[in-house]
């Protein structure tokens, strides 16, 4: 394994989401009526959340400051395939208590396995640059937000492996939310290297 980024640094880097505004048009809505249903679709701007994966992100410590690899340790730069979050909150500042900002997203939960857990089957996992979550700006609480809090629930990424004289790629899945309920799961397509 090569000496490079730690998982802690990658997790901190993943919290760096791209937040983009779409369609800055007048905030109104259109109504479509058919013989059986009526649908109202907002046409105003949306706040869009996407994940930005960067395997070259500078290694960070627990306080978000640049840090070097400690002597005698090794790490590598995982290449992320998909990611999911279980919580997104817009906070006024760094002293805003958890949950006291504008919580705009919470993952679906279930008690099917006993205790409350993230329902992985209903969660959204997205790749680089794909939309994870979108909300009309009209649904946000009015205010000034300086902090974005994102708590990850799932990561799927590739790493390098060295076995004897073979260099291989392995895929890992991390369920890092508070608890996750799975009814079934396939980490990646099975490949027979024999």
Image: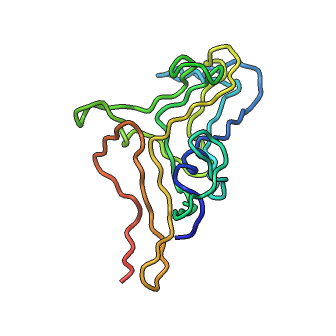
Residue in the foreground of this view, choosing between 16 and 71? 71
Q: Residue furthest front?
A: 71
* Residue 67, percent from left and from top: 64, 51
82 on left or right of 129: left
103 on left or right of 191: right
Residue in the foreground of this view, choosing between 11 and 70? 70
Rendered position, 159 above or below 106: below
> Where, by quadrant of the figure, is residue 80 drawn?
bottom right
* Residue 99, percent from left and from top: 51, 20
* Residue 112, percent from left and from top: 24, 34
> Where, by quadrant of the figure, is residue 103 drawn?
top right
Q: Residue at x 56, y 58 (%)?
A: 70
Q: Residue at x 64, y 48 (%)?
A: 52
147 on left or right of 122: right
* Residue 181, percent from left and from top: 31, 41
Q: Residue furthest left?
A: 114
Q: Residue furthest top?
A: 142
Q: Residue at x 66, y 53 (%)?
A: 57
Rendered position, 166 above or below 171: below
Q: Residue at x 50, y 58 (%)?
A: 157
> Where, by quadrant of the figure, is residue 137 drawn?
top right
52 on left or right of 23: left
Question: Which image quadrant: the C terminus?
Answer: bottom left
């Amino acid at each position: 394994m090569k000496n490079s980024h730690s998982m802690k640094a990658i997790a901190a880097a993943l919290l760096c989401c791209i937040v983009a505004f779409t369609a800055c048009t007048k905030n109104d809505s259109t109504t479509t009526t058919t013989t059986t249903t009526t649908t109202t679709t907002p046409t105003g701007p949306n706040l869009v959340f996407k994940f930005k994966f960067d395997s070259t992100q500078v290694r960070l410590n627990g306080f978000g400051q640049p840090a070097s690899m400690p002597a005698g340790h090794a790490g590598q730069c995982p290449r992320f395939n998909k990611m999911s979050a279980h919580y997104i909150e817009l906070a006024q500042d760094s002293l805003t208590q958890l949950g006291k900002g504008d919580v705009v997203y919470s993952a679906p939960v279930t008690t099917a396995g006993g205790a409350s857990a993230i329902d992985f089957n209903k969660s959204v996992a997205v790749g680089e640059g794909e939309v994870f979550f979108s909300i009309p700006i009209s649904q946000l609480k009015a205010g000034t937000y300086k902090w974005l809090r994102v708590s990850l629930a799932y990561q799927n990424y590739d790493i390098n492996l060295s076995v004897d004289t073979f260099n291989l790629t392995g895929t890992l899945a991390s369920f890092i939310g508070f608890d996750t309920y799975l009814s079934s799961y396939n980490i990646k397509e099975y490949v027979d290297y024999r």
